Image: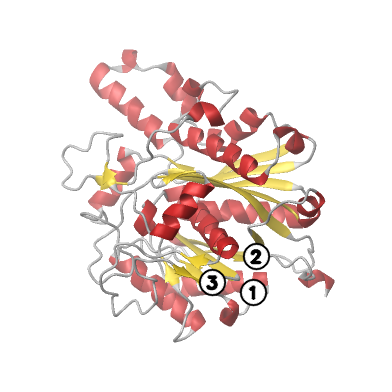
């Protein structure tokens, strides 16, 4: 299955606001500073019981003032992941200088990708049932658990009515899937704006699953490193405000980047192992959809999990498309962990910040590049650079691949359909 959408659609799609919650901080300013400095957010997981696991480190979000970002919805009605998605959505609006009233006057879309939905709430329900019996379970837990609430809660909090709302469950690629959905809806004229991205909370189920697969790192995530030994689970949200060029220019919006296109495919090759040729096909789909040549890409934000198989497969697929000298290939999971459904959304935001601010974030924790991963991963220290085009990769279980292309916005350029 693949997606490659019609070239006849001509509306340009701009990214004008971003909301970020992750282990290295909250808000786009903190995220930018953390990326520049190569700061990691690794620590001991305290959100659930890690006794019985030899390795207990991950990327947990610290406390922040939810009351600043969530005004209307009682917090006891929101699971942890929904709190992240709602707060990050309001951050994106503030960052874009857009009010709720602005959105209510227009037709929009809200799409939030996720891996676990409200897995943290399910953890709590299991704990209550095991240790206190069914009578000890709070019915509010069950009301918070449905995954669709990650997107619905955004619409409810912002009191949006003329809006299409859905949650996308395509695991680690879900943030890019959501971004692609917003791109299609705006470009086709179906909506004027979209709030899109991903959100997930740490949960014991997913941690235990990766642990049983032998994929959890002992200390740090080291993408493309010869000594890498796995990923670290993380949590957070990345939400982007996308709008049509007409909308953004009418209000004098600042623009991070233009969304140029994306590609999707699903090879179903293996439940957990990516397939090189399929990944390469998805990279090409995205470039073709964006009308971008490989030699014009300045940066690849890799899926880069730090697991032995993923990094080799992804590096080989990149070289299959880009040849012997691909552009820099960074892995931000080295800093923020694997945030599951939020991962590619945060990767897209990192790429947009690179374009906007003229720098390439590093791959942290790096020692020696694996000779089977022949890429320049910008080890440990960011570099200043003119970044015009970024490709953001996401490779999910089951062969669900999603790749997005972002570019510097040139207000004088004509869209492909106008040429």
Do tag 3 and tag 1 residues touch (Cβ < 8 Å)?
A: no
Q: Position of residue 403 (x, y in %)?
A: 54, 64
Q: Does 28 sit left or right of 53 as displayed?
A: right
State the count of labels: 3
Q: Residue furthest top?
A: 135
- Disc 3 packing (10 Å; few <14; some 14–19; many ≥20): many
* Numbered badge on residue 283: 3
Write the residue at 73% across / 42% down: 108
* Residue that numbered label 2 is attached to: 261
Q: Does 395 sit left or right of 44 as displayed?
A: right
Quadrant for residue 179, please give it.
Answer: bottom right
Do tag 1 and tag 2 residues touch (Cβ < 8 Å)?
A: yes
- Disc 1 packing (10 Å; few <14; some 14–19; many ≥20): many
> Is residue 2 among the parts visible in the rendering?
no
| Label 3 secondary element | helix
Image colouring: secondary structure
Quadrant location of the N terminus? bottom right
| Label 2 secondary element | strand
Write the residue at 72% across / 68% down: 410
* Numbered badge on residue 288: 1
From mark 3 to mark 2, how far is it between C-alphas? 11 Å
Q: Earlier in the sequence, mark 3 or mark 1?
A: 3
Q: Determine whether 184 is above or below 86 in the image.
A: below
Q: Determine whether 296 is above or below 195 in the image.
A: below
Q: Earlier in the sequence, mark 1 or mark 2?
A: 2
Q: Residue furthest bottom?
A: 324
Q: Position of residue 89 (x, y in %)?
A: 59, 40
Write the residue at 23% across / 21% down: 131
From mark 1 to mark 2, how far is it between C-alphas? 8 Å
Quadrant for residue 160, please give it.
Answer: top right
């Amino acid at each position: 299955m693949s997606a490659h959408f019609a070239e006849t659609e001509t509306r340009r799609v701009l990214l004008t606001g971003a909301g970020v919650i992750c282990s290295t901080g909250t808000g786009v300013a903190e995220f930018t500073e953390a990326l520049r400095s190569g700061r990691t957010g690794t620590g001991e997981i305290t959100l659930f019981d890690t006794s019985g696991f030899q390795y207990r480190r991950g990327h947990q979000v610290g406390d922040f003032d939810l009351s600043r970002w969530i005004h209307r919805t009682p917090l006891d009605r929101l699971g942890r992941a929904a709190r992240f998605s709602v707060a990050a959505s309001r951050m994106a609006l503030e960052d874009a200088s857009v009010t709720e009233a602005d959105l209510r006057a227009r037709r929009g879309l809200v799409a939030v990708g996720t891996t676990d939905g409200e897995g943290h709430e399910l953890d709590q329900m299991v704990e209550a049932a095991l240790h206190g019996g069914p009578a000890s379970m709070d019915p509010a837990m069950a009301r918070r658990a449905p995954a669709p609430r990650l997107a619905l809660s955004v619409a409810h909090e912002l009191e949006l009515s003329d809006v299409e709302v859905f949650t996308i469950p395509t695991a680690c690629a879900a943030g890019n899937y959501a971004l692609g959905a917003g791109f299609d809806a705006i470009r086709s004229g179906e909506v004027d704006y979209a709030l899109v991205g991903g959100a997930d909370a740490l949960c014991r189920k997913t941690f235990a699953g990766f642990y049983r697969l032998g994929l959890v790192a002992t200390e740090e995530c080291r993408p493309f490193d010869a000594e890498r030994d796995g990923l670290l689970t993380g949590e957070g949200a990345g939400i982007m405000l996308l709008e049509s060029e007409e909308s953004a220019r009418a209000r004098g919006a600042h623009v991070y980047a233009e969304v140029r296109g994306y590609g999707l495919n699903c090879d179903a090759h293996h439940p957990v192992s990516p397939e090189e040729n399929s990944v390469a096909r998805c990279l090409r789909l995205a470039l073709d959809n964006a009308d971008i040549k490989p030699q014009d890409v300045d940066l690849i934000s890799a899926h880069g999990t730090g697991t032995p198989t993923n990094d080799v497969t992804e590096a080989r697929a990149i070289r299959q498309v880009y040849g012997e000298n691909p552009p820099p290939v960074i892995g931000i999971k080295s800093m923020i962990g694997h945030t599951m459904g939020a991962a590619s959304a945060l990767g897209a935001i990192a790429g947009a910040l690179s374009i906007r601010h003229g720098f390439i974030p590093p791959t942290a924790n790096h020692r020696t590049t694996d000779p089977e991963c022949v890429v320049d991963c910008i080890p440990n220290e960011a570099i200043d650079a003119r970044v015009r085009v970024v490709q953001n990769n996401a490779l999910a279980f089951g062969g669900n691949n999603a790749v997005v292309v972002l570019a510097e916005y040139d207000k004088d350029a004509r869209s492909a359909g106008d040429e």
